Amino acid sequence: MCWSPKLRCALLAAALSLSTAVIAADKQTVCTITVNSADEKEAFRRHLPASKYEFVELVERGRPDWLASACRADIACDVLIVSGHYDGGNEFFSDRLETREFLPVDELERASCSNSCRGLFAQLKEVHLFGCNTLNSEPQSSTSAEIVRSLVREGHSLKAAERQLQLLNAGHGESSRDRMRLVFKDVPVIYGFSSVAPLGPVAASTLSGYFRASGPGEIGKGRASSRLLDHFSPYGMTATRGMTDQDPHAAVRHDVCQFSDERLSDAQKLEFVHQLLQRPMTQARPYLDRMQRFTAGLNDPARQTPELAPAQAVVAGDAAARERFLAFARGGDLSAGQVHMLTLARDLGWLTEEERWQELALMLGEMQARAVVGVTEVDLACTLNRNHELDGAFDPHAVRGARVDDVAHAAIRACLGSAEGHERTLQGLVSPNDGDVQMARAYLRNRPVTDAEELRRVAAGIARMRPSDAQVHALEALGRHYVSDRNILELMIDLYSQTPSSSVQAAIAGVLIRADQRSMAGPRLLGTLVADRRPSPAGDSMVDALIRRLKSP
């Protein structure tokens, strides 16, 4: 057969077009959500060939609705990489002060439950979650404790109450792992961490080691990689899969989606809240956070509809549900869950604002009178008084040496506006007692030092501490201040040279890696890090990460 030149050209063009289409079909899309450092994303980009993987960053800096924008863009992800600190329940966030982007898990649930983001997540084969506790299988401890107390008050023995709690957790699934499985429904592989995840530079180094050893062939195949898990085993990486319609927790997903599905009106969602409150409180309690977040915005004029007011009136007038709910809320020591319950009671019309604060003030007084308090109570007091509305609600009779005048009690007073409590807590940060340091860390996590001279005094006190776990933890608290003061940074570099402890050196590196790089003398610091480094256990460390950061252009 003899073909004309014109026909031969047409056939060749068609063949080339078909070949290009096949290549494009084989190319996978790696979507990234980078709300903290880009270290993990860049490690994947360096090792995945551009001929087979296309990278798309979903975060649009300065645009608050970036996830919705990505959903509308018809992007179909094969692999998703989420880089950000995770608060254990509600949000991926950045530890960089200049970064304003964050990722609420509620937004992921809304996209998943409303089917408004089907294209973005419909063909996902694997998800990588680089945040602490993203796949932690433990239920929230405060919820568990409250439910056990409630069951005991109802007449159950402690062992029977704990057994019922286990059954409730098994049927409900309120852990971080279950929440991620709910969001990423039907995804074959979800990678994450069961506890503390490595910082970005360390994670990137570990990824590079994996790719050098194994190559890119396992990425995007929809199967968990034992080799990737082995490389991250020192950091507790684990893998699971998304929920399916046959999953034991599928009914829970249905309930959760009643809050998140954009196709339901606020009146319909409020009716569902009312239905939940007819259940035994131990069964309704796991939904408390979602109920409270939903009802918090119902008084927004923009959300008012003709059908909402009657639904609100029905709930506010349910006296039996009100009494049952408030009895549960008042039935134990002050906790974050009880605070949410009192706030929900106000939003439902069951308490006035004044009644709510009276309840809180009474509970705060009882909490300060306890002989033993800890990090949970310090966090709670600071959270309650985030807007300083409870300044002055501390015990003014606490005196040094009294039974309830340790650093933990001082930190609670500091959270409630006490200048004496603040000074006492800062003294605890430089104490040789690691327990005191931990209480001070909890306070500073909520109330960082903002006065430059005071921060210099704190840093000098930390530098004078003996090498110990207490000094390491104090340095970690200092690092969370993102130091830019040149005097403090010079003090840290001197301490690095003088300390005999590799753990202290690693903690100092943690301060410096978060610090303002413009305030440090790069060449001198790099030489000091290498020349004065103490022998340390094998494996990557924060010092290695800082050295790489300083060497990078």
Image (cartoon, helix red, strand yellow):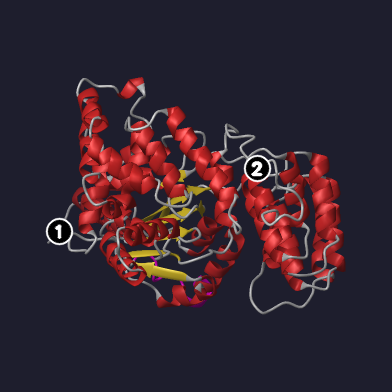
Label 1 neighbour load within 10 Å: few <14, some 14-19, many 20+: few
The amino acid on which the numbered mark 1 sits, given as a three-letter code, is Cys
| Horizontal and vertical percent position of residue 340 | 42, 43
State yes or no: residue 379 in magenta. no
Within the image, what quadrant is residue 470 found in? bottom right
Write the residue at 34% across / 52% down: 77
User: Residue 131, relative to residue 305: is it above or below?
Assistant: below
Label 2 neighbour load within 10 Å: few <14, some 14-19, many 20+: some
The amino acid on which the numbered mark 2 sits, given as a three-letter code, is Asp
Helix, strand or loop status at disc 1: loop
| Horizontal and vertical percent position of residue 442 | 63, 53
Main SS, magenta residues: loop
53 and 177: which is toward the camera: 177
- Residue 171 seen in the figure: yes
Are the two marked residues, 1 and 2, in contact with CB atoms closer than 8 angstroms? no
Write the residue at 70% across / 53% down: 405
220 and 529: which is toward the camera: 529
Which span is picked out in magenta?
211-220
Which mark, by number, is residue 2? 1
Front label number (1 vs 2)? 2
Cα–Cα gap, marks 1 and 2: 101 Å
Helix, strand or loop status at disc 2: loop
Residue 208 is left or right of residue 433, and the answer is left
Residue at which label 2 appears:
395
